[in-house]
Image (cartoon, helix red, strand yellow):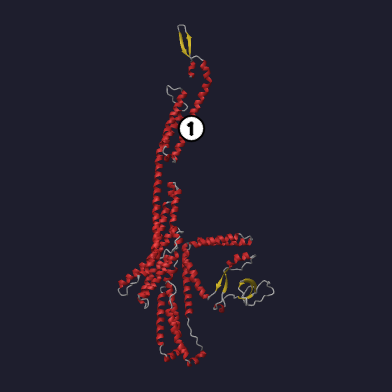
Amino acid sequence: PVEVPVKVAVDVPADVPFNVPVEVLVNVPVYVPAEVPVEVPVDVPVDCKGYQILTLHMAWGCLPENIANSKASSFYFMRTTPGMVPVYGSIEEAEMDMPLQLEYGLLNSHPLFMLDQLLNLVYQPLLSYHQYQHLEVTSIEGSKANADKRLSRRSQNSVADIAKRRTSESTTSGGISAAASSTTSAHLRDDFLVGLQKFMHETDKLLSELKGKVEYSIRDTDYLWMTQSSFMYTKSPTQVDTLLEATISKPRVGDGPLVELKYWRDRDSILHSVAEQLNDPIIQYMLTLHMKTEGDFEFTRRDLMKYATEAKDNVRFLSTLERHFRNIKFGVTFQSATETIPPMMNALRMIWIISRHYNTDELMVPLMERIAWELCERVVRVIDVHSLFQLHTQAIKGITSQAVKMLHTWKNSYFTIRAKIESSGRDVRWEFDRKRLFDRSDYIADVCQDLHDIAQVIEEFNNIFSQELKDVTGDADRIDDVLEQVYELVEPIALLPYDAFSPSRNASWQALKAKFYKRVVEIEDAAKDFIDESFQVRHLHISSASSVHPSDKFIDVVNNLFLEQKLNPPVFRAYPPVAGSIYWERSLFHRIKASIIRFNTMEEMMSTDIGKMASQKYLSVARSMRKFEETIFSKWFDSVEKSVPQLLRSSILTVVATPTHDSVRVSDSSSAI
């Protein structure tokens, strides 16, 4: 490919109410064959290999009929906002704000066909399953955040203003949507979906008529030649035979009951179109000539009318079930599909009784099998096992229980109608192949019940290892470790390399489930041991508190006694005042010390808050007593140090003379000893 300047000439109609440049020169990479001569204009650089002229035809309002019916591709642009489009100062502003002003796209097929695809493949699934797309909302919010980050790097003030406006609009719309109730939103969505389905029914019907329209190409000028030629009246019956054979042998494309309805509508449209054209006078004349020469078209006509009548009857009967089929496939919740199943089963019973086509096992079983397939596919589409456990356990239990109820309702309704038919005794019994109808639905219901039970286990673990247990045990880290092991239980389910809803993987799913519950038992045993240990420690703390409390009270009693008598301590008769006071203080200290030493041998007791408090109180009282001892000793030592030298020089015994006899008196200095 080479960069070739392409001159785009715009064919602007006269009724376009705005100015459009009629010629634009752009460089595009194209393949230029060497043998194709190219012409280089004067105003194009010399290094360019050549140029091509591309003409764009512009239409205002409606798409021209010749373009709509052709295979040409068309771009469309539609305004989504009122008023004038602002004039932007830079290309960055235009790139960011213009997409908010316009809705644009590409049409590369018939507009009616593309509209039908858009409604069936985009809007109807969005309306049907929007409430379950929690992860898409998260991803959209993440992409918006990334876009805002990219926009914030731009330096233009105008870009910042536009970003602010977008943020403001987003915030406003978010506040409005948050304020609306979920019930109102669901009703609006349901009403809009019903209207959309009616519109889709009309588009499908129109497309079927357009596809099934069969016309014979016979010109009026060929009428005389046709009467003289045997070619035309031998060719026309052959065309009918070929068309009839192709229509009858055409297979059903897709699964689900709506495919069955569409198949019969297409068949009815084609066969009735041919049957109506056979009433044309020219065709009647051709067939008359053919009957005279060949004489075998009556069998073809009879088969055509038989198959056309059959298709018409089947369309009429299946149309009574269309609303039920659409609710099963596109209903907003599993509950809506569940409520649809019983009346749908009653309608199937009426068709079984009245219809001339769906009155045998060979024809009714495939229709009911398609219904069962649609119910199973609905569960598979909504419940994504890989991301299911990112939701809250209550949401998981709600979704899975509704799915189980829907699938069980399908089976129970079948047996209820079967019992009614048997009790009536007038109609042919339903002896259908239950394996084809219920094997897959029963298996998917069992898997959904397993997922519900797994979510229940996770919820019970969360309820047990809650903040209350952390407060009671006081070991939050260990509880968090147990919860981490609980959350790891669902990791193998989120990383499944196969489809859990496939019956062929039943053995793998059962092995995974057995491994899950084995691990649950291990966690339960470890949790029981942990809880028992925690409560034993808690009980030990309580008993320790009751044991330490008397010792703590005894310390208070001794301390109060010490404080009351330390100014005038009781001294034994044989003890001096200072030594007796110290002896009294030490006797009190040894009493409280003995009790604390006994408790220090039990670390569990002393590690409690009450034990630590008692230990601190003991140390405080001991320091106070030690200070008392040091104070009185230092006072005694200071006084004795000054008086001892003088007292040592004094006599202890003194002779005193009296008139009658001599006597001995003890010196008063003896008090210093």
Furthest toward the top, the residue is 659
Q: Is residue 91 above or below residue 607?
A: below
Q: Which quadrant of the structure image shows residue 351?
A: bottom left
Residue 75: where, in percent of width, then height? 57, 73
Q: Nearer the viewer, residue 48 or 380?
A: 48
Q: Residue at x 42, y 49 (%)?
A: 469
- Quadrant housing the N terminus: bottom right
Q: Residue at x 35, y 76 (%)?
A: 360
Residue that badge 1 annotates: 623
- The amino acid type found where label 1 is placed reads Arg
Q: Is residue 443 above or below residue 112?
A: above
Residue 519: where, in percent of width, then height? 40, 55
Q: Is residue 465 above or below residue 318?
A: above
Q: Can the viewer see residue 275 in this picture?
A: no
Residue 651: where, in percent of width, then height? 50, 14
Q: Residue at x 34, y 68 (%)?
A: 415
Q: In the structure shown, which secondary structural element does the residue marked by tag 1 occupy?
A: helix
